[in-house]
Amino acid sequence: AFGAYFDELDAHYLPGRWMPHCTQSVGLDPDQLADVVAVCRRAPLPLAGRLTRVAIHDVYLDPSKEGFDRIERMEYRAVTTL
């Protein structure tokens, strides 16, 4: 469905290759990561929800930085409301 937004579709978006995910945190210090994992592990499973929007965005990185600090900006390429 998003193929029209790309000259060449990245292999990550091909059927059978995409991994659904939800980013839990950005920009934490390494010592804070254990707290995030602990909170996630306490969540009752299975989780239930409703998908309302799908988006593809471009991420621009600063090569002089590391980890999530490398993210300079993100721009939406396509957003589809379901």
Image (tube, rainbow, N blue to C red):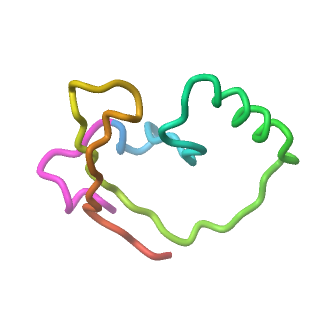
The magenta stretch spans which residues? 1-11
Q: Which quadrant of the rendered structure holds the N terminus? A: bottom left
**Residue drawn at 45 percent across, 41 percent down:** 18
Taking the view exactly as shown, the residue that stands out farthest to the left is 7
Residue 62 figure quarter: top left
Residue 70 figure quarter: top left
Is residue 73 rendered to the left or right of residue 44?
Answer: left
Query: Which of the two residues, 15 or 6, is positioned nearer the viewer here?
Result: 6
**Residue drawn at 31 percent across, 55 percent down:** 57
Is-magenta flag for residue 2? yes
Query: Which of the two residues, 12 or 44, is positioned nearer the viewer here?
Result: 44
Query: Which of the two residues, 70 or 48, is positioned nearer the viewer here?
Result: 70
Q: Is residue 26 above or below residue 73?
A: above
Is-magenta flag for residue 46? no
Q: Is residue 57 above or below residue 8?
A: below
Is residue 27 rendered to the left or right of residue 51?
Answer: left
Residue 65 in percent (x, y) is at: 29, 26
Helix, strand or loop for the magenta stretch, by majority: loop
Is residue 22 rendered to the left or right of residue 63?
Answer: right
Q: How many numbered marks are there? A: 0
Residue 19 in percent (x, y) is at: 51, 40
Query: Which of the two residues, 53 or 34, is positioned nearer the viewer here?
Result: 34
Taking the view exactly as shown, the residue that stands out farthest to the bottom is 81
Q: Is residue 67 above or below residue 44?
A: above
**Residue drawn at 54 percent across, 35 percent down:** 28
Q: Is residue 53 above or below residue 16?
A: below
Residue 75 in percent (x, y) is at: 26, 58
**Residue drawn at 59 percent across, 66 percent down:** 51
